[in-house]
Amino acid sequence: GAGVSQSPSNKVTEKGKDVELRCDPISGHTALYWYRQSLGQGLEFLIYFQGNSAPDKSGLPSDRFSAERTGGSVSTLTIQRTQQEDSAVYLCASSIPTSGRFRQYFGPGTRLTVT
Amino acid sequence: DQQVKQNSPSLSVQEGRISILNCDYTNSMFDYFLWYKKYPAEGPTFLISISSIKDKNEDGRFTVFLNKSAKHLSLHIVPSQPGDSAVYFCAASGGFNSGNQFYFGTGTSLTVIP
C-alpha cells in the first residue's frame, strides 16, 4: 500500500514479557518517528530516525525501550520486561524532511495492552 | 513540561456553525505549526500548516491563524459538518533547529451536531 503500515494492530501481553512493534514507512521517506499516546494524553515523542541512524533518542522513557531501523526502511520498537504503564497506542510516522518544513504521515498505530 | 497546550479537551458545535479550536505554545523557537485530525482507530492525518512568516493560511473550509506575540494559534472550520467530528491535534516544530522533532498538544475532541 501507499501509506505507513504498522503491525500488529493490537497486542496483549503479560507484564514482564518483551514485545516488538513494527513500522513500514512510505517508500522513499527518510525520516521515521515513533510516538505513543496514553489514555487521555497527547502524542509523546519517543525516537526519531534519519535514514538508519537515530540522532534523537531523548524521548525513550527508559532503557527497556529500544528501536532500530534497517535499510532506511522498516523500523522495530522493542519494549523489554513490559510494565502496565507501557499500555498505550504506539504510532509511527514517516516524512521527507525538506528544509525542516514537512508533515508526517502516520500509521494506524499498535494498541499495546500489558496485563 | 508541555510545550504545546490545547486547553479545551472537547468542543461541541452545531452543523453549519463555526468551530474554533485553540492551541498555545511556549517555545519561541517554534516556527512551523500543523493541525492533524484523528478518527478513532486511525492514525492522525495532516490537515493544514502554517509557517511563522505568515499569520493566516486558508484551505477550503479550514483556516489557521497564528499570533506569534501571543504564542497562540487557532483552527477555524466554517461551516462545520458532522464528518468533521474527530480529535484535532496541533503540533509545533523548530525544524532542524529543534532536531526535526514535533511537539504535539493533547488534542481537542470536536463533535459536530447535525
Image: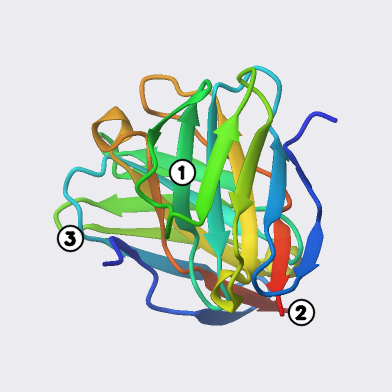
Locate residue B7, reporting x and y percent. Answer: 37, 77
Q: Secondary structure at mark 2?
A: loop
Determine the residue positioned at 37% across, 27% down. A100
Write the residue at 69% across / 74% down. A114
Q: What is the C-alpha distance between the residues marked 2 and 1? A: 40 Å
Quadrant for the N terminus of chain B, please. Answer: bottom left
Is A47 placed left or right of A11 in the picture? left
Q: Residue at x 79, y 63 (%)?
A: A11
Q: Quote the CA–CA distance across marks 3 and 1.
A: 30 Å
Q: What chain is tagged by disc 3?
A: B
- Residue at numbered disc 2: B114
Rendered view: B46 above or below B53:
below
Mark 1 crowdedness (10 Å alpha carbons): few <14, some 14-19, many ≥20: many
Question: Mark 2 vs mark 3: which is more N-terminal?
Answer: 3
Callout 3: helix, strand or loop? loop
In the picture, the disc for residue A16 is none
From the top left corner, tell me how far across and down residue B28 is, in percent: 16, 49
Quadrant position of the C terminus of chain B in the picture:
bottom right
- In front of the other: A67 or A103: A67
> In this view of the protein, can residue B45 be seen by the observer?
no
Disc 2 versus disc 3: nearer the observer: 3
Pointer 3: what residue? B70
Tell me the SS state at disc 1. strand
Chain to which the residue tagged by mark 2 belongs: B
| Colour mapping used in the image | rainbow
Amino acid type, callout 3: Ala
- Give the letter of the chain under mark 1: A
